[in-house]
Image: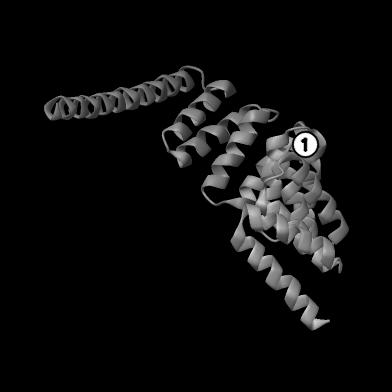
């Protein structure tokens, strides 16, 4: 019995290795095919786009950027090529370049949710809360059921000390995902900021069931505010 289990384990290892080899060959073959396509059709933006996507899948992000830049140079209104290029810049921690591409995307397609979302995240990371608010508002306009869009909008409003708007955004997030501990924490924090201690403490009670550490942290913040009054 032990021998059978051992042989089954060895078979799994061999299968995994062989599958990995074939998968790598497949990626390499796709890249080669795409490279040949741009050689044969150097003015074909779609060919460069597909090559950029293939490079990205292989983890060759600098090569992907080069190919995608060729795609948008040949076809300036190529929305998905601009978006993919923005993602590649983002992966390589090049926020200025990423923002430029995502902005071009929303200029060409104002309802491109993912581009707005990425712009909101980049502005948020950079501490540019007004920019984050602008784009997360667009996210929830395009998709009112995007819970993370409402949550991030609440965070951005909170940074701007627009506490009532932050409360509204967190409530919207919670209506879509009632067990989101971070949204309940944010809501309690914002209630505390406007002096509604009772509502803040209600969020502490909710957090006790969802995340005890967050509940303790929020309660301490509420108590410290009370001492400072």
Q: How is the image coloured?
A: one colour
Quarter assignment of residue 18: top left
Residue nearest the observer in this picture, 9 or 18:
9
Quadrant in the picture for residue 114: top right
Report the quarter where the C terminus lies: bottom right
The x, y position of residue 213, in whole percent, is 59, 62
Say few, some or many: other residues with alpha carbon within 10 Å of mark 1 (under 14 / 14 to 19 / 20 or more): few
Quadrant the N terminus occupies: top left
- Residue 175, position as x, y percentages in the image: 78, 42
State left or right for residue 57 relative to residue 229.
Answer: left
Examine the rendered structure and indicate whether residue 192 appears above or below residue 54. Answer: below
Which residue is painted at 64% across and 35% down in the image?
Answer: 83
Mark 1 falls on what kind of element?
helix
**How many marks do you count on the picture?**
1
Q: Is residue 181 left or right of residue 134?
A: left
Coordinates of residue 58 in the picture (x, y in percent) = 41, 33
Q: Position of residue 150 (x, y in %)?
A: 76, 45
For label 1, the residue is: 107
């Amino acid at each position: 019995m032990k021998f059978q289990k051992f042989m089954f384990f060895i078979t799994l290892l061999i299968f995994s290795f062989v599958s990995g080899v074939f998968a790598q060959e497949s990626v390499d073959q796709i890249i080669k095919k795409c490279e040949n396509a741009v050689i044969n059709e150097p003015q074909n933006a779609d060919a460069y786009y597909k090559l950029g996507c293939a490079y990205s899948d292989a983890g060759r992000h600098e090569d992907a950027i080069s190919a995608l830049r060729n795609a948008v140079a040949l076809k300036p209104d190529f929305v998905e090529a601009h978006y993919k290029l923005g993602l590649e810049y983002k992966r390589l921690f090049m926020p200025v370049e990423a923002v430029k591409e995502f902005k071009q995307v929303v200029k060409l397609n104002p309802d491109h949710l993912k581009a707005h979302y990425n712009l909101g995240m980049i502005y948020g990371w950079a501490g540019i809360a007004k920019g984050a608010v602008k784009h997360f508002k667009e996210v929830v306009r395009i998709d009112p059921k995007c819970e993370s869009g409402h949550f991030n909008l609440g965070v951005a409003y909170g940074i701007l000390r627009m506490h009532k708007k932050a409360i509204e955004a967190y409530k919207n997030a919670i209506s879509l995902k009632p067990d989101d501990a971070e949204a309940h924490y944010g809501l309690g924090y914002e209630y505390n900021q406007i002096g509604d201690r009772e509502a803040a403490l209600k969020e502490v009670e909710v957090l006790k069931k969802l995340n005890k550490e967050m509940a303790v942290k929020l309660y301490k913040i509420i108590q410290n505010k009370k001492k400072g009054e």
